[in-house]
C-alpha cells in the first residue's frame, strides 16, 4: 500500500462532502505530474485529504482509493472548466481515481504544524511554491501524520 496527499478547496469539495457522499470521482486534475501520480495509485492506497485555499489550510482527514484508472469525464464536456479540446474518448488525456471516505480527523493538521514537523524533501506540501494537487507521501511520513492526527 502507498500513501498520497490530495488537495481540494473546501468550498469546491470538502471532507464533509466526502463523508456525506462516501465515494467521489476525483476529477478536474489538469497537471501532468499530478495526473501521473493518479495513474500510479492502486486499490486501497490511502490518501490524506488536504483542504487548500482556506484558513488554516491543512490535512483534515483520510480517504482510500476505491477505483483506479478512471477516464475523467470532465475533459469531454465543453461547458466544463476542465474541458480539453485535444482529448477524445478514443484517446483520453486525463485519468483519475474514485476515492472513498475513511475518517475525518478530530483536529486537523495545519500547514503551519506540517512545516514545523517536516522538511520539504519529506513532505512536498511544505515546499515553497509547490502547487501540485496530488503527491506521494512516504510510509514513514504517513505513519507520523497518522500519529499526529490521532494524538490531536
Image (cartoon, rainbow, N blue to C red):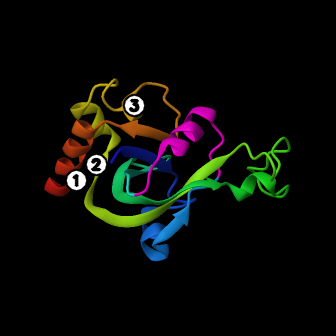
Percent of width and height locating residue 23: 49, 69
Q: Is residue 113 magenta?
A: no
How far apart are labels 2 and 1 at the CA level? 7 Å
Q: Nearer the viewer, residue 58 or 85?
A: 85
Percent of width and height locating residue 73: 72, 58
Residue in the image at 22% along x and 34% along y: 117
The tag on residue 149 is 1
Question: Would you call the spot at circle 1 few (<14 residues within 10 Å), some (14-19), or many (20 or more)?
Answer: some
SS at badge 2: strand
Question: Would you call the spot at circle 2 few (<14 residues within 10 Å), some (14-19), or many (20 or more)?
Answer: many
Q: Which residue is mark 2?
A: 109
Q: Is residue 99 left or right of residue 140?
A: right
Q: Which residue is mark 3?
A: 124
Give the residue furthest to the left: 151
Asked if disc 2 and disc 1 are in contact, CB closer than 8 Å, the reply is yes
Asked if disc 2 and disc 3 are in contact, CB closer than 8 Å, the reply is no
Label 2 or label 1, whichever comes before in sequence order:
2
Q: Is residue 96 left or right of residue 4?
A: right
SS at badge 3: helix
Q: Is residue 32 magenta?
A: yes
Residue in the image at 80% along x and 54% along y: 76
What residue span does the magenta drawing correspond to? 28-43
Question: Would you call the spot at circle 3 few (<14 residues within 10 Å), some (14-19), or many (20 or more)?
Answer: some
Question: Is residue 79 placed above or below 35 in the rendered structure?
Answer: below
Label 2 or label 3, whichever comes before in sequence order:
2
Give the residue furthest to the bottom: 20
Location of the C terminus (image quadrant): bottom left
Q: Nearer the viewer, residue 8 or 33?
A: 33
Percent of width and height locating residue 18: 46, 67
Amino acid at each position: 500500500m502507498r500513501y498520497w496527499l490530495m488537495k481540494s478547496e473546501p468550498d469546491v469539495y470538502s471532507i464533509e462532502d466526502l463523508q456525506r457522499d462516501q465515494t467521489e470521482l476525483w476529477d478536474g486534475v489538469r497537471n501532468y505530474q499530478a495526473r501521473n501520480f493518479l495513474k500510479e495509485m492502486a486499490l486501497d492506497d490511502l490518501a490524506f485529504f488536504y483542504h487548500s485555499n482556506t484558513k488554516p489550510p491543512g490535512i483534515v482527514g483520510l480517504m482510500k482509493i476505491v477505483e483506479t484508472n478512471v477516464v475523467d469525464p470532465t475533459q469531454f464536456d465543453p461547458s466544463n472548466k476542465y474541458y480539453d479540446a485535444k482529448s477524445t474518448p478514443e484517446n483520453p488525456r486525463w485519468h483519475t481515481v474514485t476515492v472513498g471516505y475513511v475518517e475525518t480527523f478530530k483536529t486537523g493538521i495545519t500547514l503551519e504544524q506540517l512545516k514545523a514537523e517536516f522538511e520539504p524533501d519529506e513532505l512536498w506540501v511544505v515546499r515553497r511554491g509547490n502547487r501540485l494537487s496530488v503527491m506521494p507521501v512516504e510510509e514513514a511520513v504517513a505513519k507520523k501524520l497518522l500519529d499526529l492526527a490521532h494524538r490531536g
